[in-house]
Structures are given as structure tokens and as C-alpha cells.
Image: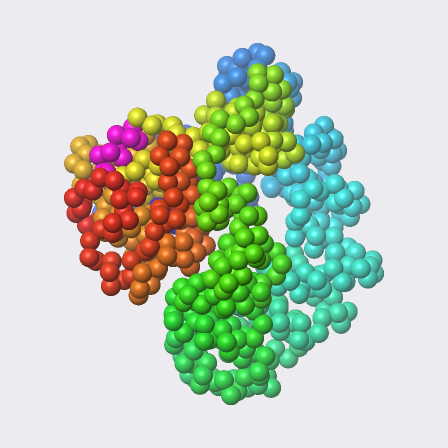
């Protein structure tokens, strides 16, 4: 149900009101056309007051920094809001929320009295620093020169908070402004204190160093160029400077452009290409044409091996074509292969082979044989193609082509052990499995089971004492994080929490996890408990909230509660109010269309989308949909993939013949879904053991039926995760 990375946001409280104003404006225009004078008079009276209110409140949150200065909230209104606050502490957070809203609207007149309130009367408030931070940031956005004219205020803020999450954030934005203003003395004083990497600031610093003749800066910028990653436009100037100094070869320029095009970073590629001498004037137009129809380009433009531009465009066209159809791309490449240099031809075959493997094409391994040296991503897909083909030597060769870092990934250690065992190297397989068995991840569980060591963990491990909790509760960063979560400022709370737990030991992490649990922030409890290295508490990692409601719905749909728990843990981390950027809502992250359809199927009366935030409703609709998907696909691994990426994709990823469930999961072409399936199934294993039901993860993964077998009814393996079969639901639209 996710489709995209989660982004838990707070809906703007005036979003619906803005929609109202825009609707009324359209109605007003309609009446003007009809020359309805009476209606216009009534309409003016109808919405004059709301419009006046909107002007009083200032800009809406989407207004950019270049907009006209916002209208101020009357001072009397702000004063009244401040006077309503408790004299010693703003325990209910009204002042903080007022300040946050004023900041979002860049309303300095509204923010100013709130700033004074938290500087004087409520300076001891744990979130007082946020009001000052918002004040400084709003001024910086409105007037960049504020960075130099009020440097003392920035410095005072940073000095007063040497180790806070706001400190690095403000320093980063201040440095960016100073760099743009070329206020180098202030810039140089702050750069060494920045604790996080920032490409824009790095390039501003290089600009200064290059201007001062720093030769080491030339080498550093050249290394960034060769990395071929997307960079902010601020870096273009330093790239141009080292080019003027003859520090970039023509080959290095074309290599960067080629890699950026391979990664589909078209804007970066075009900006980088401007540094190439004698760049064909049609280059940018050609990249645009390839983006629209790469096949047509390759059919019309024969590559010229002596022209780097022509070769680069041909490789881009091949890669672009392979994204949608590797077989057709291979045919096109065959037609122009004689016109390409050998090295570039090998690059093209590597791209086609990679996309062919992602499309589960049976020719992928043969294409890899034509490829040149592989990068880690290409080697990983060669390994996955080998898995689906049952070719263990090819898998070993693919893993051997990976970097040392990539080879240490649990997936490749596990599959290498499987290859060693299949090829008769039992000692090597044993060694790899023993190292994996100590890890609590999907492949660690599989390895432990193959060693006969798969035992349920100790659910209630080390538990923090009262003094541990008190000590953690008093940490300033923890105080701020929990205060932010109480105000529903989740993004700020998350940043504070991550900062607070950076250097904690296992005991402190488990104490922090317990605080998060008692504060009803289950996602932080889970994620914090997962960080421990030696001491563990699996009851914190795998909580079972809402069990009565969940069991009721799981039984009604004939689903195993451990599987449902495992899915919810991955979907929302049990945050009942979770909402994704694409609109998925609640524990089971239901999309609006899915929720409406499921509500209709189950006969839910008076359903509205707002009800998907209610735990019982969300569980009822999500469980019904999960059952529907399971009935349609016939296997829990397929159903898990479908819940994340859609039933159509889950079917398309099946092989022609039955496939081991773990191989199906590892060869899913979407990174998110591949990770999702493995984690959901591992979660289900942990929850099964916590509920007292011993399971084999290998049996849970089972064998995914081949495409020709998938319509013959529900697989017997479904019984592992769905003990009680129910009648198939009406198909979704």
C-alpha cells in the first residue's frame, strides 16, 4: 500500500478553507459572466468576512519567500494569545504552535511578539529555542542580507546550544547565505563547526579556496566531478573553474555526462556537458528526443565511433530503451554494435543485461556474458538472474564481481553460502551461515534454520529500571523530542529523537525505547530498540498493540494474526495516525480508493475517508483487502508483494515455473518492495513465536507457483499464514 517512501506530515489546518476560497472565486467569475448583479451583491457579503480573515492571518503556507511581505496579525490578537498562556510554562504548547504557524507563513510581525515572550517570560521552556530558530530562519529567507547584518544573533544562538539538532540546521542555512553573499570571514569561522556534509556549502568553500590558489581544492573538486552524482547548481561554478585550470580531461567530462545519463539525471548531465569543448549544438535537443522515443532515435541516428557525443547519445538511447523493454533494446544495439567502440559496447550490454534481469528475461545471463566490467548494481542483478535460473556458478561469479562492501550484504553472504553448499564446498557454506545466524534479519533467520539453530528469542530481555528511565527522561534532547511529539510536530520530534539517541549504549537505548512506548510513539520505540547490539528486548521491537481488534478481524478473514502484525509493523510502525505523502492512511496504510471499495464490499454504513484513521475501521478494511489479495494470488509471499506494489506487478514477477519464495522475494525489481516483503515475512516469524506458535521461515516463504499454476486455486502453502479459508471477495475495480 505504500508505493513510495513514507513521509508523515501534518495537514495544514487552513487547507480546506483555502479550497473554499478558490471555489468561491470560480463561482464569482461565473456570476460576472452572467451579469447577475443581485447574486454578486449577496456573494460579496457571503465571503467578505472569510477573505478579510485570510488577509489578517497573512500568507498561506505555500507562499514562497519571494512573495510580497505578509499581512500582519494584529498586535492585539497576538497579545491576547500570549496573555492566555500560563505565566511559568506553556505546557499546552499554544505559544509554540502559534510561532510555528507564523514561521510557516513567514509572518515576522506575528512571530516577533512570540519571540519576545519565549525570550523573557518563558525562556526556560524546553522548546523556547525553536521560536528563536524560526525567527532567525524566517528573517534569513525574507532578506538574505540578514545573515551579515545580524551575525551576532546567529552566533549567540549557536553558542548557547552547542549540541542541539537546531544548531547544525541553523549553521547550515546561515553558511549557505554567507556563501552566496561572499561574506568569507564569517563563512570561514563557521565551516569547521558544521557537523553534517552539505554539497552546496562544500562548493562555496571550494570557490573561495580556488580563488586563493589552493591546489588541494582542485583535486577535491575533481574527485566530486568523477563521482558523477547529482549536485546543486552552486557547484557549477567550481566545476567551471577547475575546467579553466585544465584540470578536467575531455574523457573525464564525457564519462561524467554518460554516467549521469545512465542514472537518468538529465538536468545534471546537460549542465555538465556545457563544459565540453566543441559540444554539438544539438546535444541537449537530442537528449530530449531520446527521452521521448529512444527507439526512433537509434533507428534514425547511426553512431559515429569517432564522435564522443554520438557514442554517448547512442548509449543513452540504448539504456532508455532497455528500461521499458530489454529485448527490443538488445535488437537495436545489435543493429548499431559495429559502430560502437568495444568498451562502450560492453557498457551498453551491461545496461541491457541489468534491465533484462529486472524484467526477469531469460536472456539476461547471456547478455551479461557480453558485458564489460560491472558496477555493484549490475552485479547484483546478474546474481538475481542467476538465482532465478538456478545457475550457482554464475551467482558466485556475480558476487565475486561486487565490491567488498557489497559482498558483505546479508543477501549475498546467504546466497553465496547456498551456492557453496550446492557446489560441494560445505565448510565455506558452514562458515558463512554461522556468521549470518547471529543476525536478526531475514537472511540471518534462514541461515540459522539451515543450521538447525532457529530458536525463538528471549522476548523480555533487559528491562530498564526506574532510575534508568528517570535519567533518560531528564536528558534535554529527550525532553524536547517528547514535547514536540505531544504537540503533534512529528517531523521536528523525529529529528530531535534521532539526535538524542546518537551515542547511547544498549541500556540507554532500551530506556529510551520504553519512554517512547509509554508516550505512545511506537515507531520510535521499535526503531530505537532495534539499534541495540548485545542487550535486546524483542517485546519492544515487536509490540502487539490493538490485539483484541486485530484478532477479531484476522479471524473474520481467516488470516494469521502474526502475518497481519508483521505487515502493520512494516506499514506504519503502529502509528494509528500515520499518513503517507500519497494519501495512505492508518495502521494498514489504506489508499482512499481501496478504503472506499473495501467499505462497500463489507457493507459498512455511512463510510467516510475520515474513518480510516479509526483503528477498528482501518483493521477491518485492511484485513478484508489483504484477504482479497491472498485469494486472488494464492500465496502469502505474492500477497505481501501485492499489498505494497499492487496485484498486477506481483503476478508479473512470477516465473514460468514454481520458484522458491526467498528467490522470488530477492528478485523483485522494486527496491522498496523487495525490502518490504523480506521484512514483513521476518516480522511474521517473530510475531508467531511471540504468540507461542513455532514456525519455519522457510515453510512460510514456501514455493511461489509458476504463472501457469497461479490460477488453479489457493496453494496449500497458504495454510501456513491463512489457516481458515474464506470465500473469495468480489474483485476490486
Q: Residue at x 28, y 49 (%)?
A: 717
Of residues 421 and 182, the one drawn nearer to the viewer in this rendering: 421
* Residue most extreme to the bottom: 338
Q: Is residue 254 visible?
A: yes
In the picture, measured across the screen, residue 8 lies left or right of residue 169, that is left
Q: Is residue 9 visible?
A: no
How many marks can you see?
0
Q: Position of residue 581 (x, y in %)?
A: 41, 44
Q: Residue at x 67, y 64 (%)?
A: 225
The image quadrant that residue 311 belongs to is bottom right
Of residues 676 and 204, the one drawn nearer to the viewer in this rendering: 676
Asked if residue 307 is positioned above or below residue 175 in the image, the reply reads: below
Q: Is residue 50 magenta?
A: no
Asked if residue 72 is positioned above or below residue 204 in the image, the reply reads: above
Q: Residue at x 49, y 73 (%)?
A: 368
Of residues 644 and 79, the one drawn nearer to the viewer in this rendering: 644
Asked if residue 460 is positioned above or below residue 571 in the image, the reply reads: above
Q: Is residue 555 magenta?
A: yes
In the picture, measured across the screen, residue 118 lies left or right of residue 539, that is right
The stretch in magenta equals 549-558
Q: Position of residue 458 (x, y in %)?
A: 49, 30
Q: Position of residue 460 (x, y in %)?
A: 49, 26
Query: Would you say the magenta stretch is mainly helix, strand or loop?
Result: helix
In the picture, measured across the screen, residue 661 lies left or right of residue 234, that is left
Q: Position of residue 538 (x, y in %)?
A: 48, 32
Of residues 674 and 478, the one drawn nearer to the viewer in this rendering: 674
* Residue most extreme to the top: 87
Amino acid at each position: 500500500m505504500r508505493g513510495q517512501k513514507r513521509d508523515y506530515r501534518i495537514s495544514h489546518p487552513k487547507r480546506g478553507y483555502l479550497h473554499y476560497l478558490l471555489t468561491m472565486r470560480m463561482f464569482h467569475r461565473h456570476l460576472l459572466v452572467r451579469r447577475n448583479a443581485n447574486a454578486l451583491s449577496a456573494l460579496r457579503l457571503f465571503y467578505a468576512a472569510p477573505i478579510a480573515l485570510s488577509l489578517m492571518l497573512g500568507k498561506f503556507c505555500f507562499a514562497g519567500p519571494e512573495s510580497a511581505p505578509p499581512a500582519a496579525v494584529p498586535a492585539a490578537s497576538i497579545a491576547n494569545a500570549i496573555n492566555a498562556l500560563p505565566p511559568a510554562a506553556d505546557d499546552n504548547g499554544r505559544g509554540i504552535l502559534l510561532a510555528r504557524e507564523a514561521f510557516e507563513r513567514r509572518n515576522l510581525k506575528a512571530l516577533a511578539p512570540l519571540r519576545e515572550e519565549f525570550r523573557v517570560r518563558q525562556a526556560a521552556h524546553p522548546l523556547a529555542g525553536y521560536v528563536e530558530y524560526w525567527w532567525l530562519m524566517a528573517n534569513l529567507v525574507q532578506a538574505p542580507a540578514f545573515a551579515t547584518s545580524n551575525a551576532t544573533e546567529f552566533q549567540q544562538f549557536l553558542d548557547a546550544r552547542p549540541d542541539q539538532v537546531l544548531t547544525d540546521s541553523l549553521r547550515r542555512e546561515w553558511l549557505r547565505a554567507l556563501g552566496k553573499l561572499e561574506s568569507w570571514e564569517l563563512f570561514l569561522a563557521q565551516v569547521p563547526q558544521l557537523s553534517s556534509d552539505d554539497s552546496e556549502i562544500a562548493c562555496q568553500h571550494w570557490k573561495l579556496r580556488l580563488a586563493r590558489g589552493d591546489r588541494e581544492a582542485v583535486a577535491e573538486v575533481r574527485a566530486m566531478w568523477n563521482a558523477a552524482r547529482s549536485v546543486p547548481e552552486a557547484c557549477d561554478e567550481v566545476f567551471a573553474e577547475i575546467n579553466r585550470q585544465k584540470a578536467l580531461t575531455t574523457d573525464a567530462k564525457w564519462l561524467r555526462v554518460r554516467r549521469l545519463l545512465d542514472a537518468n539525471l538529465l538536468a545534471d548531465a546537460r549542465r555538465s556537458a556545457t563544459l565540453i569543448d566543441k559540444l554539438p549544438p544539438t546535444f541537449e535537443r537530442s537528449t530530449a528526443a531520446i527521452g521521448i522515443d529512444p527507439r526512433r532515435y537509434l533507428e534514425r541516428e547511426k553512431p559515429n565511433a569517432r564522435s564522443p557525443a554520438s557514442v554517448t547519445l547512442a548509449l543513452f538511447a540504448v539504456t532508455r530503451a532497455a528500461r521499458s523493454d530489454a529485448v527490443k533494446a538488445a535488437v537495436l544495439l545489435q543493429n548499431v554494435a559495429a559502430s560502437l567502440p568495444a568498451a562502450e559496447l560492453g557498457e551498453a550490454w551491461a545496461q541491457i543485461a541489468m534491465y533484462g534481469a529486472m524484467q526477469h528475461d531469460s536472456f539476461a545471463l547471456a547478455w551479461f556474458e557480453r558485458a564489460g566490467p560491472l558496477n555493484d548494481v549490475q552485479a547484483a542483478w546478474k546474481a538475481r538472474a542467476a538465482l532465478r535460473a538456478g545457475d550457482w556458478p554464475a551467482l558466485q561469479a556475480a558476487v565475486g564481481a561486487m565490491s567488498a562492501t557489497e559482498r558483505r550484504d546479508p543477501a549475498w553472504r546467504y546466497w553465496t553460502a547456498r551456492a557453496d553448499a550446492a557446489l560441494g564446498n560445505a565448510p565455506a557454506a558452514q562458515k558463512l551461515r554461522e556468521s549470518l545466524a547471529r543476525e536478526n534479519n531475514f537472511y540471518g533467520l534462514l541461515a540459522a534454520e539451515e543450521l538447525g539453530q532457529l530458536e525463538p528469542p528471549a522476548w523480555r530481555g533487559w528491562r530498564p529500571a526506574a532510575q534508568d528511565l528517570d535519567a533518560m527522561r531528564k536528558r534535554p534532547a529527550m525532553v524536547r523530542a517528547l514535547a514536540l511529539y505531544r504537540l503533534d510536530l512529528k517531523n521536528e520530534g523525529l529529528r530531535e529523537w534521532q539526535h538524542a539517541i546518537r551515542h547511547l549504549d544498549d541500556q540507554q537505548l532500551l530506556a529510551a525505547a520504553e519512554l517512547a512506548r509509554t508516550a505512545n510513539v511506537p515507531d520510535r520505540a521499535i526503531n530505537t530498540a532495534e539499534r541495540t547490539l548485545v542487550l535486546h528486548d524483542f517485546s519492544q521491537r515487536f509490540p502487539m498493540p490493538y490485539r483484541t481488534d486485530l484478532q477479531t478481524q484476522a479471524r473474520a478473514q481467516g488470516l494469521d494474526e502474526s502475518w497481519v502484525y508483521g505487515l502493520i509493523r512494516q506499514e506504519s510502525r503502529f502509528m494509528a495516525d500515520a499518513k503517507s505523502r500519497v494519501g495512505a492512511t492508518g495502521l494498514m496504510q489504506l489508499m482512499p480508493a481501496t478504503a472506499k471499495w473495501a467499505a462497500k464490499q463489507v457493507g459498512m454504513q455511512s463510510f467516510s475517508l475520515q474513518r480510516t484513521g479509526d483503528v477498528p475501521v482501518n483493521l477491518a478494511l485492511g484485513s478484508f483487502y489483504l484477504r482479497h489479495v491472498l485469494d486472488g494470488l494464492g500465496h502469502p509471499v505474492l500477497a505481501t508483494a501485492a499489498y505494497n506494489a499492487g496485484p498486477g506487478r506481483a503476478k508479473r514477477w512470477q516465473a514460468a515455473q514454481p520458484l522458491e519464495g526467498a528467490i522470488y522475494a530477492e528478485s523483485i525489481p522494486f527496491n522498496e518492495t523487495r525490502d518490504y516483503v523480506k521484512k514483513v515475512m521476518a516480522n511474521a516469524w517473530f510475531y508467531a513465536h511471540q504468540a507461542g506458535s513455532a514456525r519455519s521461515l522457510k515453510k512460510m516463504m514456501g514455493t511461489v507457483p509458476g504463472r501457469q499454476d497461479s490460477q488453479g486455486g489457493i496453494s496449500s502453502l497458504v495454510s501456513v499464514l491463512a489457516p481458515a479459508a474464506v470465500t473469495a471477495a468480489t474483485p476490486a475495480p
